[in-house]
């Protein structure tokens, strides 16, 4: 079995992910559904051979990282096929890999259903914009589309800090410096500190993983930079709570005040299965108004959901409203809408189920 063939077939089938795990056939995730390449179950030796082939494509990256530490993350490109983001790991003593398929070309936001109001957030000249959602919900793609819009429209210096690099941006109107953790820098914190000395206008921070990274990101946002980043949360209120809870209790009030000053918007997204077997995005969009700034400052986060639900004129939309629209337009079923809803009981009444 050849890794090149596996990668090529995955792209041809429109797979989002490839799974190479001992005891199972090579598996693809297509529109959220797992499919097998064939009936041949992989042995530990076969997974090791396939994963060695992946490392060979990654410019000779050392497989020692995963064999010793048990985990490794990196990306690579296969000419004429696609780019791939790889997470290799050990399970039951054998090597395994999950590979995310990333297209060479940046996708068209309209084709993906990304609203113009989300892309418009990239036109802010400073502050913190967060794109959140569960793993595999398309956060990286949304952020890449926002970076591409800045790149096409503004003469700016954009620095992206990612682990690993996904979409590759060519220089258009802007200068784009793309840095990969472990390849170009030792950590997000080190790269973010250095970025502030590299005359940035926009910084894309792949993920805000700890309070040290969040602190530097908020300081950068305070000093006149636009910071785009992501978190694995669903809902604006949950996102704000997650940021504040990353800090010790004695610092949380200070962080609430700082976050209230720098936060510009939170976009939360989920990918939901459609009636025709595909997937569609559902978005919650919160833009930070003076009222919301006060709620964050005064730790009244629980009131934010009701503000989002009643602020359509401020370019806001609640997740359940987005799901309701998809359901009423026939894109998703009512069952799917309720499954992904933040308040299923209330949505069920609105849909009169």
Image (cartoon, helix red, strand yellow):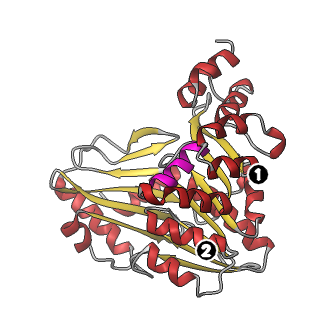
Residue displayed at 66% across by 42% down:
284
Q: Nearer the viewer, residue 322 or 201?
A: 201
Is residue 137 in view from this perspective? no
Q: Residues within 10 Å of mark 1 (few under 14, many from 20)?
A: few
Residue occupying image coordinates x 40% and y 52%: 18
Q: Is residue 112 above or below residue 342?
A: below
Q: Nearer the viewer, residue 298 or 277?
A: 298
Q: Earlier in the sequence, mark 2 or mark 1?
A: 2
User: What whole-number distance in Å separates the C-alpha atoms at marks 2 and 1?
Assistant: 21 Å
Locate the N terminus and report the quarter of the image it occupies.
bottom left
Q: Which residue position holds label 2?
A: 220
The answer to whether residue 120 is seen in the rendering is yes
Which mark's residue is nearer the viewer, 2 or 1? 1
Count of numbered circles on the image: 2
Label 2 environment density (alpha carbons within 10 Å; few <14, some 14–19, many ≥20): many
Q: Position of residue 239 (x, y in %)?
A: 55, 49
Q: Is 119 or 299 nearer to us in this picture?
A: 299
- Circle on res. 290: 1
Q: Residue at x 56, y 82 (%)?
A: 195
Image: magenta residue range: 235-247
Residue 352 lies, in percent from the top left, at 68, 12
Magenta stretch, main secondary structure, is: helix
């Amino acid at each position: 079995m050849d890794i090149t063939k596996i990668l090529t077939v995955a792209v041809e089938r429109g797979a989002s992910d490839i799974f190479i795990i001992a005891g199972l056939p090579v598996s693809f995730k297509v529109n959220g559904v797992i499919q097998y390449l064939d009936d041949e179950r992989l042995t530990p030796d076969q997974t090791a051979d396939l994963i060695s082939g992946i490392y060979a494509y990654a410019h000779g990256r050392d497989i020692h990282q995963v064999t010793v530490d048990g985990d490794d993350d990196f990306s690579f490109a296969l000419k004429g096929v696609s780019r791939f983001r790889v997470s290799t790991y050990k399970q039951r003593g054998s090597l395994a890999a999950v590979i995310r398929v990333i297209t060479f070309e940046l996708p068209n936001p309209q084709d993906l259903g990304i609203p113009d109001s989300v892309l418009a957030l990239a036109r802010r000249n400073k502050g913190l914009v967060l794109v959140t959602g569960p793993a595999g919900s398309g956060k990286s793609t949304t952020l890449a589309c926002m970076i591409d819009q800045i790149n096409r429209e503004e003469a700016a210096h954009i620095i992206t800090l990612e682990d690993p690099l996904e979409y590759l941006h060519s220089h258009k109107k802007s200068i784009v410096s793309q840095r990969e953790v472990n390849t170009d820098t030792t950590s997000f914190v080190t790269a973010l500190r250095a970025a502030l000395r590299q005359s940035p206008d926009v910084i894309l921070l792949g993920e805000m993983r700890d309070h040290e990274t969040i602190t530097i990101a908020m300081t950068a946002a305070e000093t006149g930079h636009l910071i785009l980043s992501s978190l694995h949360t669903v809902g604006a209120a949950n996102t704000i709570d997650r940021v504040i809870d990353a800090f010790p209790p004695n610092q949380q009030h200070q962080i609430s005040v700082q976050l209230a000053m720098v936060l510009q918007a939170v976009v939360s997204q989920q990918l939901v299965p459609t009636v025709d077997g595909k997937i569609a995005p559902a978005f919650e969009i919160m833009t930070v108004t003076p009222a919301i700034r006060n709620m964050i400052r005064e730790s009244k986060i629980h009131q934010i959901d009701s503000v989002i639900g009643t602020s359509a004129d401020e370019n806001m939309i609640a997740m359940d409203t987005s799901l309701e629209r998809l359901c009423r337009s026939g894109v998703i079923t009512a069952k799917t809408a309720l499954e992904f809803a933040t308040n299923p009981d209330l949505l069920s009444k609105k849909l009169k189920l």
